[in-house]
Image (spheres, helix red, strand yellow):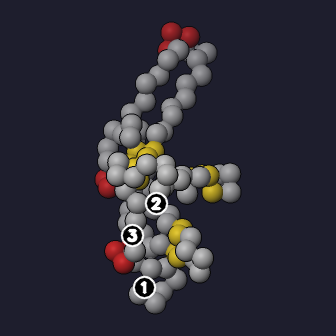
Amino acid sequence: ADGSAGGETSEIWTPDIQLWNLETGLADGLEDAYAIVQHDGRVYWSRPGHLRPACKFDGLDRFPFDHLTCQMEFGSWAFSGKYIRLAKADGVGFS
């Protein structure tokens, strides 16, 4: 680590989490940021930015009374769910 509140991500392993249904890649949409490593090995790595998913909408024929949602599909290309488990952080977002 560099002695600040977080450690440089170049010094620790970081997952290859990607937005699978992306319009633009995560590298283009998210800033690099420091990671916070807890004493028990948990890592908090928050990267500010904007995601641009490619969405397939159903129900446009009911406009303007439609209700559209867009599912964002995250995962790793290199590791299965056996090794990387995405979970909501405090029920608000994903970690």
Mark in front: 1 vs 2: 1
Say what amino acid the circle numbered 1 marks.
Ala
Residue type highlighted by circle 2: Pro
Three-letter amino acid code at disc 3? Trp
Label 1, label 2: how many angstroms apart (C-alpha)? 20 Å
Q: Looking at the image, tell me whether mark 1 or mark 3 is earlier in sequence order.
A: 1
Q: Is residue 51 visible?
A: no
**Label 1 close to label 3 by CB (< 8 Å):** no
Q: Which mark is residue 48?
A: 2
- Which residue corresponds to the image point at 40% horizontal and 74% vertical from the top-left? 12
Q: From mark 1 to mark 3, how far is it between C-alphas? A: 13 Å
Say few, some or many: other residues with alpha carbon within 10 Å of mark 3 (under 14 / 14 to 19 / 20 or more). few
Q: Can you give x and y, in whole percent of width and height, for residue 79 in the image?
A: 39, 52
* Image: 43 above or below 75: below
Decide which of tag 2 and tag 3 comes sooner along the chain. Answer: 3
The CA span between labels 2 and 3 is 19 Å
Measured as percent of width and height from the top left, residue 91 is found at 68, 51
- Residue 43 vs 2, above or below: the answer is above
Query: What is the number of the mark on residue 94?
Result: none
The secondary element bearing badge 1 is classed as loop
Q: Check residue 13 in the rendering and tell me which mark sits there, or answer none.
A: 3
> Disc 1 or 2, which lies upstream in sequence?
1
* Outermost bottom residue: 3
Disc 1 crowd rating (10 Å Cα; few below 14, some 14-19, many 20+) is some
Q: Are the residues flagged by discs 2 and 3 in contact, CB closer than 8 Å? A: no
